[in-house]
Amino acid sequence: MQKKSDLPTKTCPVCGRPFTWRRKWARNWDSVIYCSERCRRSKS
């Protein structure tokens, strides 16, 4: 098991906050762009 600080991170283009890898994104981490559904819906 990895430490939380060792997980990969990305920055959300909408809110600008960093977000870390989640288990539910394991298969498609390369295609994850937004940190949440709220940011995905408010993209512009």
Image (tube, rainbow, N blue to C red):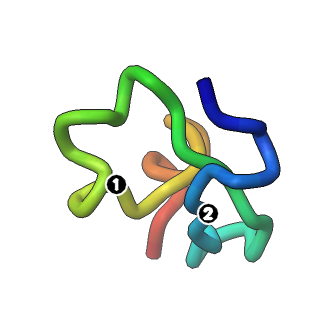
Q: In what quadrant of the picture does the N terminus appear?
A: top right
Name the one closer to the observer, 10 or 42.
10
Q: Earlier in the sequence, mark 1 or mark 2?
A: 2
Residue type of the residue flagged with mark 1:
Val
Q: Judging from the image, what secondary structure is the residue with disc 1 in?
A: loop
Give the number of the disc on residue 9. Answer: 2
Look at mark 1 in the image and give the residue it sits on. Answer: 32
Whether residue 30 sits left or right of residue 2 in the image: it is left
Residue 22 against residue 29 in the figure, above or below: above
Crowd class of label 2 (few under 14; some 14 to 19; many from 20; radius 10 Å): few
Name the one closer to the observer, 7 or 36.
7
Give the number of the disc on residue 1. Answer: none
Q: Are marks 1 and 2 in contact (CB under 8 Å)?
A: no
Name the one closer to the observer, 11 or 43.
11
Q: In what quadrant of the picture does the C terminus appear?
A: bottom left
Cα–Cα span, label 1 and label 2: 11 Å
Name the one closer to the observer, 14 or 35.
35
Q: Judging from the image, what secondary structure is the residue with disc 2 in?
A: strand
Mark nearer the viewer, 1 or 2: 2
Whether residue 25 sits left or right of residue 18 in the image: it is left
Whether residue 32 sits left or right of residue 15 in the image: it is left
Crowd class of label 1 (few under 14; some 14 to 19; many from 20; radius 10 Å): some
Provide residue 7's location: percent of width, then percent of height: 62, 50
Residue type of the residue flagged with mark 2:
Thr
Residue pictured at 31% horizontal, 34% vertical: 26
Residue 15 against residue 32 in the figure, above or below: below
Provide residue 32's location: percent of width, then percent of height: 34, 54
Residue pictured at 35% horizontal, 34% vertical: 25
Residue pictured at 63% horizontal, 73% vertical: 11
Provide residue 16's location: percent of width, then percent of height: 75, 75
